Image (cartoon, rainbow, N blue to C red):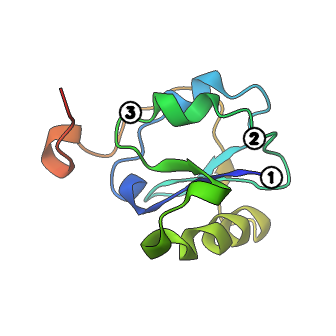
Amino acid sequence: MTNVVTGNCHGCRYTDCVLVCPVDCFYGDDKMLYINPEECIDCGACIAECPVEAIFYIDDVPQNQQHWIQINADKCENGETTNICKKEEPLSKIEEIHTIPK
């Protein structure tokens, strides 16, 4: 099993999730983060840390976001991404892209 980063991460790339990942399975490009399904241990720690609610257990990925399952696998496999293990500056301010519930 694995967790999946979905489209809500696109253009944000908040890295709060990588800080709690015990196996460093997050990868990123210049647009967003991805989870390597071969490395993820499905602990779920990252899900609660994502401020834009972009990460789901694979069985809970919304129907309209299912295509991100394969995208995560492909992006991590093809070498276009780099391993992200530490907090980095997000691409934009969260308020500009998403409304965070209070």
Q: Earlier in the sequence, mark 2 or mark 1?
A: 1
Residue wearing tag 1: 1
In the rendered image, the quadrant that contains the C terminus is top left
Mark 1 or 3: in front is 1
Mark 2 or 3: in front is 2
Q: Which mark is residue 42?
A: 2
Task: Name which residue type carries label 2.
Answer: Asp
Task: Name which residue type carries label 3.
Answer: Glu
Residue wearing tag 3: 89
Picture coordinates of residue 75, whole percent (x, y): 66, 67
Q: Earlier in the sequence, mark 2 or mark 3?
A: 2
Task: Name which residue type carries label 1.
Answer: Met
Q: Residue at x 46, y 57 (%)?
A: 30
- Verify CB contact (< 8 Å) between mark 2 and mark 1: yes
Instruction: Tell me which corner region of the image, top left, top right, bottom left or bottom right, holds residue 58.
Output: bottom right
Q: What SS does tag 1 mark?
A: loop
Q: Earlier in the sequence, mark 1 or mark 3?
A: 1
Residue 45, above or below 28: above
